[in-house]
Image (cartoon, helix red, strand yellow):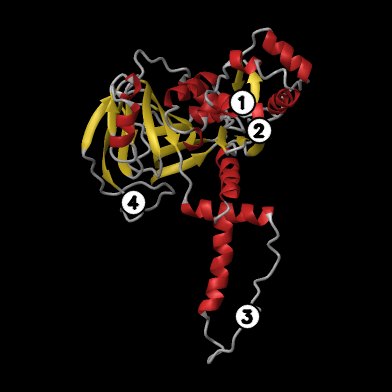
């Protein structure tokens, strides 16, 4: 794949994914950035858009963070250099940015976080740091010099007096400059520091993974909402003890049995994880359609040749059981059976739904009703 510098997906996943960095020259040849610096500033003024400004020096304090939304005049009062504007979830607001994600479908949908834009004038940076997630850094406009390498973790020294996790005394292993279309892949924990060599925009395509804490608390909360957890542990076979203060193996066995029974229910685990991993990151963009449609209108719109696509902030995934398929969309689940099961992989394959095979399902009232629901709740729309 050109995106991976000629590497096959298998080779990339085997040799680089979560293992070591990869520099890819002209991953996107002749790349033209879909957004300008002024447009990023405009988005940063919007209430629903997550944005930040990082100043390398702010009133004598190092690496200070300011959260948006910002007033338009804020951008007139910034210094000439050594600052950065970050706009999170740019793919949620700009369809042309969301289209970039189609190039990364060799990574499961549920792993995607979002695309963040970083604008900086010459000298701008967010400081040396590391991330807990995989990221592809695509140079979209201008040039940025990157130094990277070496493993970092929570024990790595950090600069004091800043709310940011800026590494102290860090030195990378390699330095290079990325130009538009070039891309750098970094696995979690690799230190990196990018500095703008001129006015530049970098797009960070980030891939998340839940923490163990997220998994444990999320799944147990889900289980508690799905079953009767008000019952108490019972010990009808209680036996006398030499010391009442001793916790017996029998008591621990009873607790362990409860936990094992909960964890052995794979179906429940699948249903939880599908809903958890597709919950939208931004609730402000997955909103009901301005003009809800009925089944007849939906079918007629498809017949007219309209292209159906995901809401840019929506997440789609599925899991195939033996006799049914669970479709997960924006934190909700829909169980498909029989002839409806192939609909799930069709909807999840690409953000632009393949319309020719989709039309075959529109004669089924239940499937058509599901598509209408997904449209009216804002997860799908006609392009």
Q: Quadrant of residue 250?
A: bottom right
Q: CA distance from mark 1 to mark 3?
A: 52 Å
Please indicate whether residue 263 sits to the left or right of residue 129 in the image. right
Labels 2 and 1 touching (C-beta < 8 A): yes
For marks 1 and 3, give the one nearer the viewer: 3
- Crowding near the residue tagged with mark 2, few <14, some 14–19, many ≥20 C-alpha atoms within 10 Å: many
Q: CA distance from mark 1 to mark 4?
A: 43 Å
Q: CA distance from mark 2 to mark 1?
A: 8 Å
For marks 3 and 4, give the one nearer the viewer: 3
In the rendered image, residue 196, in percent from the top left (x then y), is placed at 33, 28
Secondary structure found at label 2: strand
Which residue is label 2 attached to? Answer: 336
Q: Earlier in the sequence, mark 3 or mark 2?
A: 3
Q: Quadrant of residue 330?
A: top right
In the rendered image, residue 58, in percent from the top left (x then y), is placed at 42, 42
Q: Earlier in the sequence, mark 1 or mark 3?
A: 3
Q: CA distance from mark 4 to mark 2?
A: 43 Å
Secondary structure found at label 1: helix
User: For the C terminus, which image quadrant?
Assistant: top right
Residue at image location 66% in from the left, 33% down from the top = 337
Q: CA distance from mark 3 to mark 2?
A: 45 Å
- Nearer the observer, 253 or 375: 253
As drawn, the label of residue 153 is: 4
Secondary structure found at label 3: loop
Labels 1 and 4 touching (C-beta < 8 A): no
Tell me if I can see residue 217 in this picture: yes
Q: CA distance from mark 3 to mark 4?
A: 49 Å
As drawn, the label of residue 343 is: 1
As drawn, the label of residue 237 is: 3
């Amino acid at each position: 794949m050109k995106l991976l510098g000629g590497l096959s997906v298998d080779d990339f996943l085997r040799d680089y994914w979560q293992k070591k960095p990869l520099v890819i020259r002209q991953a996107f040849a002749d790349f033209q950035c879909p957004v300008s610096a002024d447009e990023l500033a405009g988005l940063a003024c919007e209430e629903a858009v997550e944005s930040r400004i990082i100043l390398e020096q702010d009133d004598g304090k190092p690496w200070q963070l300011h959260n948006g939304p910002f007033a338009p005049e804020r951008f007139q009062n910034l210094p000439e250099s050594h600052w950065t504007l970050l706009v999170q979830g740019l793919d949620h607001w700009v369809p042309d940015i969301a289209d970039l994600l189609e190039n990364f479908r060799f990574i499961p949908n549920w792993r995607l976080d979002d695309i963040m834009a970083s604008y900086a004038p010459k000298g701008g940076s967010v400081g040396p740091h590391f991330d807990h997630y995989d990221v592809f850094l695509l140079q979209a406009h201008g040039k940025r010099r990157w130094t990277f390498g070496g493993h970092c973790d929570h024990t790595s020294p950090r600069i004091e007096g800043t709310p940011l996790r800026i590494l102290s005394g860090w030195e990378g292993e390699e330095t290079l400059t990325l130009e538009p279309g070039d891309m750098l892949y970094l696995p979690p924990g690799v230190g990196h520091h990018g500095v703008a060599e001129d006015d530049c925009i970098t797009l960070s395509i980030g891939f998340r993974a839940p923490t163990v804490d997220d998994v444990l608390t999320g799944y147990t909360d889900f289980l508690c909402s799905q079953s009767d957890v008000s019952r108490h542990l019972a010990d009808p076979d209680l036996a006398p003890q030499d010391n009442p203060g001793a916790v017996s193996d029998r008591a621990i066995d009873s607790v362990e049995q409860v936990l094992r029974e909960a964890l052995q229910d794979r179906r429940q685990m699948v249903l939880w994880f599908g809903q958890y991993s597709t919950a939208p990151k931004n609730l402000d963009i997955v909103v009901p359609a301005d003009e809800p449609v009925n089944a007849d209108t939906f079918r007629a719109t498809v017949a007219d040749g309209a292209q159906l696509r995901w809401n840019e902030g929506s997440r789609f995934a599925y899991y195939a059981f033996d006799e049914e398929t669970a479709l997960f969309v924006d934190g909700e689940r829909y169980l498909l059976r029989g002839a409806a099961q192939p609909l799930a992989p069709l909807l999840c394959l690409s953000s632009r739904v393949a319309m020719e095979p989709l039309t075959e399902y529109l004669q089924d009232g239940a499937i058509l009703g599901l598509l209408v629901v997904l449209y009216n709740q804002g997860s799908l729309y006609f392009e």
